[in-house]
Amino acid sequence: MVRELTAVFIGGYLVFLIVLLSKLASGKQEFASLIQALDSPVSQVLHLCVLVAALWHSVTWFNLTPRALPIFIGEKRVADTLVAVVMGYLPWLVVSMIILWAISEDWFASVPN
């Protein structure tokens, strides 16, 4: 039930992203005021709650993957841990590292020497 509740946080954040995009499309002034509002402590706490919910949702899904999609090699079933790592955690780690690399490259390029 907790996993299903985390979907509410994810859905709420998706609505927020749609509002963010609409403010961006409507003009620079409205977008700037929204970005300024995101600097508040309440906004940061809400973002942290959504991050925790997203992590919980992802981890529980990866742990359920072997039950939803059992893998067999011949007659032998592949270990649940191996399926969860190869089909969930490993791709998640690779994509996260690529994103961190891209952000760090962009950040280091913007820092004056």
Image: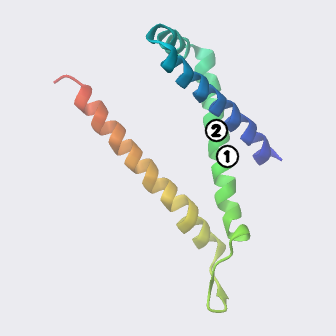
Residue at x 63%, y 16% (from the top left corner): 42
Instruction: Tell me where residue 5 appears, x and y as whole percent.
Output: 78, 41
Instruction: Tell me where residue 51 appears, x and y as whole percent.
Output: 60, 36
Q: Amino acid at mark 1?
A: Trp
Q: Residue beneath label 2, please?
A: 52
Residue in front for this viewpoint, 34 or 51? 34
Q: Is residue 72 above or below residue 97?
A: below
Residue at x 68%, y 47% (from the top left corner): 57
Residue at x 51%, y 15% (from the top left corner): 26
Is label 1 in a helix, a strand or a loop? helix
Cβ atoms at labels 1 and 2 below 8 Å apart: yes
Distance of label 1 from label 2 (alpha carbons): 6 Å
Residue 28, picture quadrant: top left
- Residue that sits furthest to the left in the current view: 113
Q: Is residue 102 above or below residue 44?
A: below
Residue in front for this viewpoint, 21 or 60? 21
Residue at x 53%, y 25% (from the top left corner): 21
Residue 66 falls left or right of residue 105? right
Near mark 1 (Cα within 10 A), the count class, few <14, some 14-19 or many ≥20, is: some
Q: Residue beneath label 1, please?
A: 56
Instruction: Tell me where residue 46 appears, x and y as whole percent.
Output: 64, 25
